[in-house]
Amino acid sequence: MKRKIFFFIIFFIFFLPAFFLYFFYRSKAAPIKANIVVDTQKTMGKFPDRFKALAQGGEEKGVRMLENVIDLVAGLYPQYIRIDHIYDFYDVVFLDNKGNIVLNWQKLDETICDIYNVGAKPFLVLGYMPESLSEDGTLIGKPKRWKDWSFLVQKTIERYSGKNTVLPCGPLSEFWKTNIYYEVWNEPDLETFGKWYYTGKKNYNELYFYAEKGAKKAQNVYPFKIGGPTTTALYKNWIHRFLDFVLENNLRLDFISWHHYSKNPEDFIDDMIALNKYLAYPKYYQFQKLEKIISEWGYDSNPNPMADTNLGAAYTIKAIRNFIDANYKLAFLFEIKDGINPSWGIITNDGKPKPRYQALKLLNDLSDMRLLVEGEGTYVSALASLSYNRINLVLTNYDPEEKNTEMVPILIKNLSDGEYYLKKTNLLLQETQEKITVKNNQFKTNILMTPNSVWSIKLEKINE
């Protein structure tokens, strides 16, 4: 009898709590299935377009990277296109036999025109250091003379924001030359790009100081933006030391920029929360209203085959779904086109769209008024918009383990009764269309979401 009581006590002390913990964590980890509800009367203001920004890295020197994909990129309606390597890849700077700087804008002009032909404005990275001006003869060294760096920045701004500049693609109106962005360097903290610091002999703050000095000297130009520090991630020390320097030297700063690569699409919200904390100190209050820009973002900062898959496409929509609510000015998806070898591109080197491109294309119809989406799940999330007599919905089932499949119920409420066209489109841009009748001011449907699938649903009333 005593032995039975002993084992009974042991069971209660050790095993019963374990059973409770097991079922608690199992239930806690159980994924929530989506049950999407969209109410046309629950609007959230104008649909944000801050994600309509694309970046092109330096993949091929001497090649107009956008030339063979202008129509494809135009189909995504980007506001801005970011390019780097503007001095070294486009052979801008030469020295004459007297050591004077000679500038040749021809090659860079051609790419700037390609950006305009896409229907976007340029976002230019000021870098890298022309070898002829560099202290150590490399693209990542300090300049021999800081005044040469200032002069180069001044002339770049006068070229592309200049009121009298005429590019090979013809005269441009004030709109196209206004609010061009100039970002000082690219990932200065990375060894590949110079391993600049916020202190010491190779000091990014000094690099910014002389760039800003050149910007101030720019004459006869439309309003433009200059900023940084464009680090590989959002670092508190970098932000504070950079802003301290800006304050101490009364420098112009129009935006704060950094890069963000993460396999977790939730992290983009964390960046804005962190930056707001960094700027909450009284001495930094004046910077709280500055534009915040992620000038590169993606799944992996290294080339990753995932970028070419449906997983990459689903991740892209999920990330945009998350950061679209944050107060970013722009977020530049990296990158537009592969080099010779597959890399980060949403388009192959020879001009073929990948799944991430198709995912962005499905977002095109989201416009005008944003609608509240209720009933998102652990894996399935969505964005919705209302435009006159049309409701658009984009859903993604982001699942890195590729296990979650669900039949997702969709309810759209507060519609006007009548005849509608219902169109469903997937990542392969395969479409189904049917005519349906809405009664009792609502419409129900279901859609099968396989792992990492993305679907667009359009419900458009037929004019009577």
Image (spheres, rainbow, N blue to C red):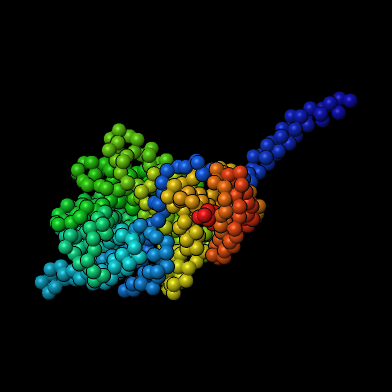
Corner quadrant of residue 157: bottom left
Vertical placement of residue 182 versus 440, above or below: below
**Quadrant of the snapshot with the N terminus:** top right
Q: Is residue 427 left or right of residue 134?
A: right
Residue 277 x/y as whole percent:
38, 37
How many numbered marks, from 0 up?
0
Point 21% across, 46% down: residue: 251
Residue 47 x/y as whole percent:
43, 48
Point 21% across, 41% down: residue: 248
Residue extending furthest toward the right: 1
Corner quadrant of residue 121: bottom left
**Which is nearer the eye, 409 or 180?**
409
Point 38% across, 57% down: residue: 53
Residue 357 x/y as whole percent:
47, 63
Q: Is residue 410 left or right of residue 75?
A: right
User: Can residue 319 be seen here?
Assistant: no
